[in-house]
């Protein structure tokens, strides 16, 4: 959707940053809560990529292209 159309409809502008990488992550759940949290080095790398990525961009880490065996 074009920004002019967003303005015309009085909607907020879109700002996104998407990062992707490959690797092992851990899933944690606290008590009875349904919400789950992902953590691990892959999540940390994606967070760092997002912090350095310009708005409205997608960044893919180098591990996406590296075959690893666990």
Image (cartoon, rainbow, N blue to C red):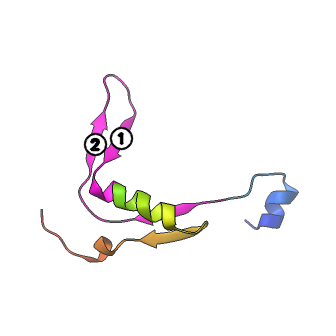
In this picture, residue 42 sits left or right of residue 47? left
Residue sitting at x 24%, y 76%: 66
Residue sitting at x 35%, y 56%: 44
Q: Nearer the viewer, residue 48 or 60?
A: 48
Which residue sits furthest top?
32
Residue 46, image quadrant: bottom left
Residue sitting at x 72%, y 65%: 1
Q: Quadrant of the C terminus?
A: bottom left
In this picture, residue 56 sits left or right of residue 38? right
The answer to whether 42 is drawn above or below residue 34 in the figure is below
**Which residue, given by chain and number where applicable, does mark 2 sit on?**
27
Mark 2 nearby-residue class (10 Å; few <14, some 14–19, many ≥20)? few
Q: Is residue 24 magenta?
A: yes
Are the two marked residues, 2 and 1, in contact with CB atoms closer than 8 angstroms? Answer: yes
Q: CA distance from mark 2 to mark 1?
A: 6 Å
Label of residue 37 in the image: 1
**Where is residue 53 drawn, in percent x and y?**
52, 68
Q: Is residue 40 magenta?
A: yes
Q: First in sequence: mark 2 or mark 1?
A: 2
Which residue sits furthest left?
70
**Where is residue 16 drawn, in percent x and y?**
59, 60
**Where is residue 57 drawn, in percent x and y?**
56, 70
Q: The residue tagged with tag 1: helix, strand or loop?
A: strand
**Where is residue 36 drawn, in percent x and y?**
36, 37
Which residue sits furthest right?
8
Residues drawn in magenta: 15-43
């Amino acid at each position: 959707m074009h920004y002019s159309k967003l303005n015309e409809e009085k909607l907020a502008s879109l700002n996104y940053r998407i990062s992707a990488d490959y690797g092992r992550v851990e899933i944690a759940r606290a008590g009875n809560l349904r919400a789950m949290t992902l953590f691990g080095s892959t999540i940390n790398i994606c967070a760092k990529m997002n912090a350095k990525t310009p708005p409205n961009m997608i960044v893919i880490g180098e591990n996406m292209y590296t075959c690893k065996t666990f």
